[in-house]
Amino acid sequence: MMMNFPIISLERLNGVERKDTMEKIKDACENWGFFELVNHGIPHDLMDTLERLTKEHYRKCMEQRFKELVSSKGLDAVETEVKDIDWESTFHVRHLPESNISELPDLSDEYRKVMKEFSLRLEKLAEELLDLLCENLGLEKGYLKKAFYGSRGPTFGTKVANYPQCPNPELVKGLRAHTDAGGIILLFQDDTVSGLQLLKDGEWIDVPPMRHCIVVNLGDQLEVITNGKYKSVEHRVIAQTNGTRMSIASFYNPGSDAVIYPAPKLLETETEENSNVYPKFVFEEYMKIYAALKFHAKEPRFEALKAPNVKLDPIAIV
Ligand code: OGA
Ligand code: NI
């Protein structure tokens, strides 16, 4: 049976419907790893402006480059499946621990300003969501934010992507299947061209486009901290034959030196026979493994970090 993709209105967090909304968020975290937020408080006109500027920037600065790349690799005329390339045109912006937006080439002043404003709003929304997760998990308020903090605070960045119209979507993926490495991901996606899918019970399910909503999903680090109560879910992007899909994905992640481990409070409730405990590691170490194994299953990444971490103290070996 096909269940409905979870759509959650944050407006209903206030007042008598709070309990029901918290319950919906909990169900989405436990059973989907994904949900769509409406009434999230981010002004719709800000989203509209960002969408317009992103699409203009793509046409002006990215589209031609993408076409050249495609033809130089012969991707427009492939006859067998391509397994090592994604049909996407992207650039990345970092907001935290410090912004690099002033260093990025080709962005108009207006685009920089709007992107900055949007990212500040999203950062607040990510932190609000982390606290709602804490509440549902029985963790103290601020626990997850603190867990991600490290010595310099969280890493927060945006991947701006366009998935151009594609002649052979069955042979080349917009973005190959993966789980996200980090914490919590907030996605502003095209409201007409679809393509994002998540894997649920062995089936690929569309994450339906909806105007002005924010798609939220959980990354591998939340799976570790919750000791598997919440799971990062595999997803992919199918390129479309009917148009280019915009996606602005923002990643609220641990700081590179944050030490990630299952919340002790959540381990107390584990039974003896169900004591699969996730590893403890420095986030940066996780990212090294992820960089090499992003498009592989996540379990070997967790396993690799469970191996005893033998570090020789230079003084001890003299
Ligand atoms: C990602 C991702 C989905 C999208 O960048 O990790 O899953 O719709 N993006 O762009
Ligand atoms: Ni992803």
Image (spheres, grey):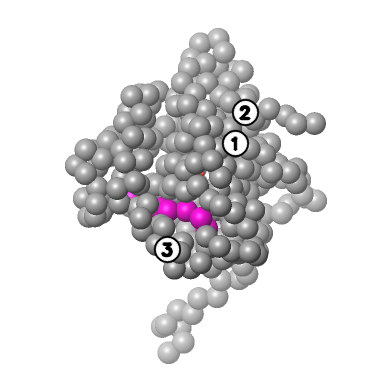
Q: Secondary structure at mark 2?
A: loop
The residue range painted magenta reads: 86-95
Labelled disc at residue 105:
none
- Magenta segment, principal secondary structure? strand
Q: CA distance from mark 1 to mark 2?
A: 10 Å
Sequence-wise, which precedes: disc 1 or disc 3? 3
Name the residue nearer the viewer: 210 or 299.
210
Residue at the location (37% across, 24% down)?
44
Tell me where residue 230 appears, x and y as whole percent: 63, 42
The residue to which callout 1 is attached is 207
Sequence-wise, which precedes: disc 3 or disc 2? 2
State the quadrant of the N terminus.
Answer: top right
Q: Ligand 1: does it lie within 8 Å of the C-beta at label 1?
A: yes
Q: Are marks 3 and 2 in contact (CB under 8 Å)?
A: no
Q: CA distance from mark 3 to mark 2?
A: 37 Å
Sequence-wise, which precedes: disc 1 or disc 2? 2
Left/right placement of residue 94 relative to residue 219 reads left
Label 2 crowd (10 A; few <14 / some 14-19 / many >=20):
some
Q: CA distance from mark 1 to mark 3?
A: 28 Å
Q: Amino acid at mark 3?
A: Leu
Q: Secondary structure at mark 1?
A: loop
Left/right placement of residue 235 relative to residue 260 reads right
The residue to which callout 3 is attached is 69
